[in-house]
């Protein structure tokens, strides 16, 4: 881990007399990681632990699509034609969300899966100050097995893994090993420059997931200097 990131973590994890040692502290963190690695899972857990919102840009787009906001009609047009949502739309939605959080007194955020390009990262610097970027990694064979087992619940839309849970789901999936490998190749090509972008700024923490949540969560807390018996117990 880079020196600047380590210093920020030490400040963030210092003791406090308040019921929650993290209440009122600013956490401006980003989670990176290839599809299926578990960004949302770990970001959500840290969100609950630290008392800051977990913000996924995909959720922001879906919320805007279901609203009558100014961008809604333009977004619907893009999505209906199968086009990618331009960076300026994403940044606009994110800026609006961060401003709303600031007005409500939110003490930070955890961004999930954004930025994905250097252009996005550079633009984001003009919107907010990122303290730490956590890059989750998982060996390819484990990631392939995990992605091949992923399904979507036909009733609630939640993601789950057929190897871990018995639930009625939709087995119709285009995820083959070849498709997943190509998806990972594209992701790595796009995001390696983003990793370098934050590494040069001393903000990148590389974290290799050693296994499932019970094994990885306590180790992630240790890497983030957030570990104590009470926090590890929620794994």
Image (cartoon, rainbow, N blue to C red):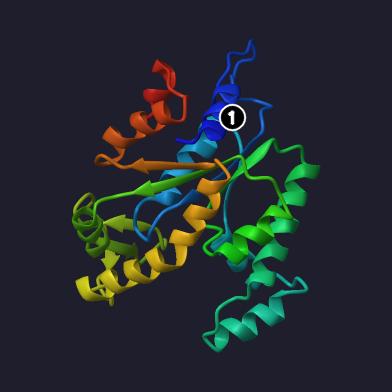
Q: Quadrant of the C terminus?
A: top left
Residue 223 point in image, percent of width and height: 41, 30
The answer to which quarter of the image holds residue 179 is bottom left
Q: Nearer the viewer, residue 178 or 42?
A: 178
Residue in the foreground of this view, choosing between 78 and 164 = 78
How packed mark 1 is, by other alpha carbons closer than 10 Å (few <14, some 14-19, many 20 or more), is some
* Residue 31 coordinates in the image, percent (x, y): 49, 48
Horizontal arrangement in the rendering, residue 234 relative to residue 86 (left or right): left
Q: Is residue 113 visible?
A: no
Residue lying furthest front: 200
Residue under label 1, please give it: 8
Is 137 left, or right, of 28 in this rendering? left
Q: For residue 63, what is the image quadrant?
A: bottom right
In what quadrant of the picture does the N terminus appear? Answer: top left
Instruction: Give above or below for 135 relative to 214.
Output: below
Q: Position of residue 114 (x, y in %)?
A: 55, 58
Residue 10 can be seen, yes or no: yes
Q: Residue at x 38, y 59 (%)?
A: 34
- Give whichever of 107, 196 is nearer the camera: 196
Residue in the picture at 61% in, 66% down: 119
Q: Residue furthest right?
A: 103
Compared to residue 85, the image places residue 16 above or below, namely above
Q: From this view, report whether residue 65 is shown above or below residue 167.
A: below
Please state the horizontal and vertical placement of residue 74, each as a whole percent of the image: 70, 81
Residue at 34% x, 62% y is 153
Element under disc 1: helix
């Amino acid at each position: 881990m880079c020196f600047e990131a380590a210093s920020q973590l030490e400040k963030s994890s210092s003791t406090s007399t308040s019921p929650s040692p993290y209440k009122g502290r600013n956490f401006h963190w980003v989670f990176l990681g290839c599809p299926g690695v578990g960004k949302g899972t770990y970001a959500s857990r840290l969100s609950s632990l630290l008392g800051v919102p977990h913000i996924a840009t995909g959720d922001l787009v879906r919320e805007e699509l279901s609203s009558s906001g100014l961008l809604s009609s333009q977004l619907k047009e893009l999505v209906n034609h199968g086009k990618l949502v331009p960076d300026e739309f994403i940044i606009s939605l994110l800026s609006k969300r961060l401003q709303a959080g600031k007005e409500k007194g939110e003490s930070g955020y955890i961004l999930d899966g954004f930025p994905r390009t250097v252009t996005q990262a550079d633009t984001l610097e003009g919107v907010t100050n990122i303290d730490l970027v956590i890059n989750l990694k998982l060996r390819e064979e484990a990631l392939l097995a995990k992605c091949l087992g992923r399904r979507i619940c036909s009733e609630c839309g939640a993601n789950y893994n057929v190897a871990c849970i018995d639930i009625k789901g939709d087995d119709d999936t285009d995820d083959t090993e070849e498709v997943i490998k190509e998806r990972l190749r594209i992701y790595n090509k796009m995001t390696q420059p983003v990793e370098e972008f934050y590494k040069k700024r001393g903000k990148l923490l590389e974290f290799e997931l050693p296994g499932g949540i019970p094994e990885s969560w306590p180790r992630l807390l240790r890497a983030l200097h957030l570990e104590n018996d009470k926090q590890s117990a929620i794994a």
